[in-house]
Amino acid sequence: MDSSQIGDAPPSDQAEMTPVRGDTGSQDDELEDALEDTMEEEHIDPGPTEAEILEAKLKELEGYQFPRHVEPEEDGTGKLAYISVCKKLGILFPIDSIVERLDKEAVILDHAGLGDKGSHALAEAIRINSNITDLSLVDNWISPKGAEPLIASLCNSKSVRRLDMSDNRLGVQGSVVDVTAGVLVKSLVTKNSIITELVLRNNRLSDKDVEHIADGVNDNVTLQSLDLSYNEIQYRGAQAVARILSHNSELRELNLEWNHFRTAGSFVILNEGLLFNNTIKRFNLAWNGIDDDGGVVLGKIIGENAIEEIIVSHNKIGPRGADAIAKGLKSSTALSVLVLDDNPLRDDGCISIIRALRENGTITRISINVRPTSFFR
């Protein structure tokens, strides 16, 4: 075979394998047409285009509202003010658990470990808050230093009607501040025009404190319940309490349980105070050394006043005092509860009181339980 024949021979196999450019374009068009036909048949939504997505994002940005900074004074609950002061004072105890309660009407922060710093921070919240009606701060180790800013806020409060500061350290004298518990409480009951219940149980209050408190309470016309139990009030304080009872005509409940009045002080409270008060409804003078002479005065009070509940348990009232109480029961028109537990009434005294109940139409509960090992102060 010569070379000219070889060169002129057509490459039949290669020609069949080489694609034609015009054929590729037509195949792509056919694929697109087939895809469109399939989408139309199956009703498939191709979704938004890139331009449409971009336009939607721009509209979203145009309507975006950036968070507005709220000043502590603008927050009516006082939460922001509380948090702000906590940060300034470096308070480390859990803050959120206290903050979450500040929008309630009854704010119970018993055993919360506030201390004086926490009390200072809480004072800022109370200053702003206008919803709290009942504030309980039992056992928070608050001294006059911590109570001072708190009481200052409460003096201007138009919502807090009940304050319980039991088991704190208000009566403890410190060298840092000159203000005392008595001065603070006097300020509260003088300036606050809506508070009706004040609980100061177990705060180591002294005679001097109660003298100040009496000065404020004497002129107060809203306070209805006062609890001074488990303090360190002695004879001078008893005289101040008697002044409260003989001057204030709005107080309805007074708790003086477990103080240091002893026999002389208790007699002054009864004879110079309660005997001349006809508005007190509930009265507690347990654990204070009342003897038969005090029992005689109690008999007059029961028979002549409109008092409804008397608790004088754990005292020294004997048969003579019991006879006087029995006489008062016969003529009483108001007393419904009388508690004489752990007094040395003896059999004669108990019998006198039981017989008097036959002529009494108001008593609903009376208790004269005596334990063999009673301790009388």
Image: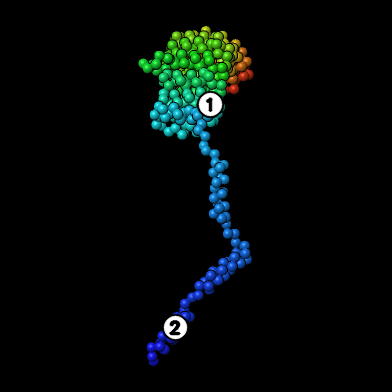
| Real-space CA distance between mark 2 and mark 1, rounded to the nearest whole angstrom | 99 Å
Q: What x and y, as percent, mark residue 127?
A: 51, 23
- Residue designated by label 1: 129
Q: What x and y, as percent, mark residue 11?
A: 44, 83
Q: What scheme was used to colour the molecule?
A: rainbow
- Residue designated by label 2: 11
Q: Please tell me which residue is depicted at 52% across the width and 25% down the height of the picture.
A: 128
Give the residue type at disc 2.
Pro
Q: Determine whether the residue tagged by mark 1 lies in a helix, strand or loop.
A: loop
Task: Say which quadrant the C terminus sits in.
Answer: top left
Q: Please tell me which residue is depicted at 63% across the width and 66% down the height of the picture.
A: 41
State the residue in front, 126 or 270: 126
Quick one: label 2 or label 1, which is nearer the N terminus? 2
Which numbered dot is residue 351? Answer: none
**Relative to 12, residue 338 above or below:** above
Q: Is residue 127 visible?
A: yes
| Marks 2, 1: nearer the viewer | 2
